[in-house]
Each structure stands twice: as C-alpha cells, then as structure tokens.
Amino acid sequence: MQAAWYGKNGEARDVLSVGEMAQPSPAAGQVCVRLHTSGVNPSDVKSRRGRPLADALVVPHSDGAGVIEAVGDGALAARIGERVWIWNGQWQRPLGTAATRIVVPSAQAVALPDNTDFAAGACLGIPALTAFQAVHLLGDLRGKTVLVIGAASAVGFYAAQMAVLAGARVIGTVGSEARAALALSAGVEATINYKTQAVADRIRELTAGRGVDAIVDMDFASTARLLGEGVLAAHGVVACYGSNENGDIGIAFRAALFGSYTIRFFLVYDLTPADRRAAIAGLNALLMQGRLKHAIGARFALDDIVLAHEAVEHGQVIGNVVIDLP
C-alpha cells in the first residue's frame, strides 16, 4: 500500500517520507478500510514535531474515510463494501490514516451516511466529535448565549452550528474578515475580531453587561484571563478542549468562585465509552439529516503531505485540511 511516515521528530520536510509499505491484515474484531481521504489536524503536526516515538515508524493522522474491504474473525462480513469514517486512527498506535489502508477495531469504523462525501468524512473524528462533546457538556442551551472561541476553526465551525441547532444565540471570536464570514455562515449572530477588538468589552456590549451563559473554548490560556473580566454570567459553563500554552495556567479564582462557574475539560481521544457512543450517534444523526455544513479549506495529494502539514502549521487555511489518497 502507499503511505506516508516519519521515523523521528522534526519539521515536515525533514522527516516525512512517502512510499510503499506492507499492507496490514485485520485480526479478530478488526476491519481493513481502503481509505479515500485523510484529515490533517493540529494534533497531528504537534505529534510529528515533538511527541516521542514508541515505534520505529509512524504513519500519521487519526481521521479519515473510505470503504471496508476486509474483516477479521468476529467482525461482520456484511460490513464489506460499507462506507465509513474513522476515529482515533493513530491514537496510541503507530499506523494512522495517511495511507491507502488502515486496520482498526470494527467500532472505530463508523458508517458514513450516503449524503456525506469522503472529504467531509475525514473531518469527523477529531473536529466534529470534539465540537459535539463540547456542546453536549454545556447542557440545555435553549434560549442561552454561547461564546465559541475560534468560531471559524475546524472545531469551532462545527461547534457554532451545533450550538445554534440546540437553540442558542452564538457569538464567535475570529482573527480576520474571511474567518468572520465563515463563522456567520455557521449561524453565528455576531463575531469579535480578537486581533483588533477588546474581546471582554465587546462581549459585555453584546450581552448588556450580563456575559454569556457558556463558552466553547479552544485556548484556555486566553479564556482563563477573560473569566476575570465579566465575560461569563453567574453559573456559567466552560467546555475546554485545548490551549495554546503548555504550562500551568492560572484562573481568576474569586470570579470563578463567586460566579459559581463550572469548567469542564475533556480530551476527544479519551471520551468515556458512553460519551463516545452518544457523540457518534448524535453526529451521524445530524449528518443523515443534512444539518451540518463542512468547511474544506484545502486538499492535497498524498505526495504533497509535507505541504499539507505546513498548511496546518502556518494557520493560513480557513477550514479543514484533507489529503486525497491515490
């Protein structure tokens, strides 16, 4: 099979190779998927640059979509020919989706609705599932106001749509006019350019001084500082899935205490089985109903995986980066 891999940490053009690799065979309970697309996420490039390798070679990427072409003992033979999307393809294992085939436990290959193409399927495992879990953790959103940090990001674009579908009024932070336009297309009512506007001041203006009821947060290092500036209403909830700073992060303790804030952290790779089942079922229901938009910002061939990784690292692509497999 054709695949991309690296054998040491480093810059994309220094460590990534593309070539032929032995094709895997499914063991008991596993399926082999002939992949058509592979999604590139920030976690993939961070792993390539700095996560110590536990194996001699790593085929990167956790997200992808394709067709089941073989099954192992105990897996349903009827699944052969089924269109599927992949989650946790390269989580705690060396062989991810940057290859024409992947072998995963049957549960990690989820039926892809007929109305959803393979490119969109490569955006579901991390971006869409993260968004679904974040919105789920906020509770009942009917009639509430939600702030989505990075509303035009891969996760934020889905989270904004899901919050709107749940009955919320959504405000989103963005970094450019082009990103504001994408966020507005997701149903965001108002955007705040965090590069040119005082975010806390603008939130207070938009909420008549009350603050938002909930926050979907991709950068806790920044959001933690906002919590002391009146952006979150009393008894508000924050669902956080990341931060742009790796070290310890302080919070405005008195504001959090007297505001009775709830802060929910989660890692999409490590959802509880119950949360995983609920998120997959809920996400696929939205897909089958045609209620989600997908933002594919750039597509690359497998031979151009270096350019795909650099596009994610530079942050200039608006939307998801997808690799089309040969």
Image (cartoon, rainbow, N blue to C red):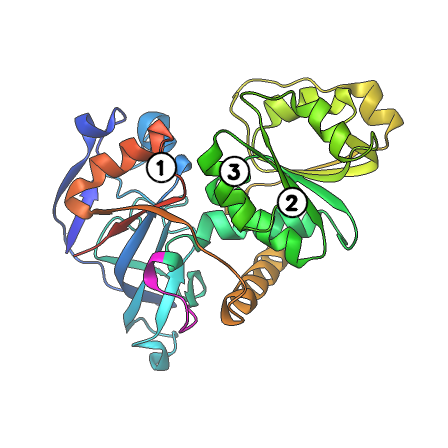
Circles 2 and 1, Cβ within 8 Å, touching? The answer is no
Residue 114 is marked as none
Question: Which numbered disc flags the more N-terminal residue, 2 or 3?
Answer: 3
Labels 1 and 3: the sequence-earlier one: 3
Mark 2: few/some/many CA within 10 Å (<14, 14-19, 20+): some
Q: CA distance from mark 2 to mark 3?
A: 10 Å
Query: In the rendering, at what x and y percent does residue 175 appear?
Result: 50, 29
Crowd around label 3: few <14 · some 14–19 · many ≥20 (10 Å): many
Q: Which residue is mark 3?
A: 180
Question: The residue under label 1 is which amino acid type?
Answer: Val
- State the residue position of label 1: 317
**Foreground residue among 207 and 267:** 207
Q: Secondary structure at mark 1?
A: loop
Q: Nearer the viewer, residue 211 or 236?
A: 211
Helix, strand or loop for disc 3: helix
For the residue marked with disc 3, what is the amino acid? Ala
Point out the image quarter for the N terminus. Answer: bottom left
Q: Which residues are magenta?
A: 112-119
Tell me the CA gap for discs 2 and 1: 23 Å
Q: Which residue is mark 2?
A: 189
Percent across and percent down for residue 89 are 37, 51
How crowded pointer 1 is (Cα within 10 Å; few <14, some 14-19, many 20+) is rated as some
Q: Name the foreground residue: 269 vs 252.
A: 252
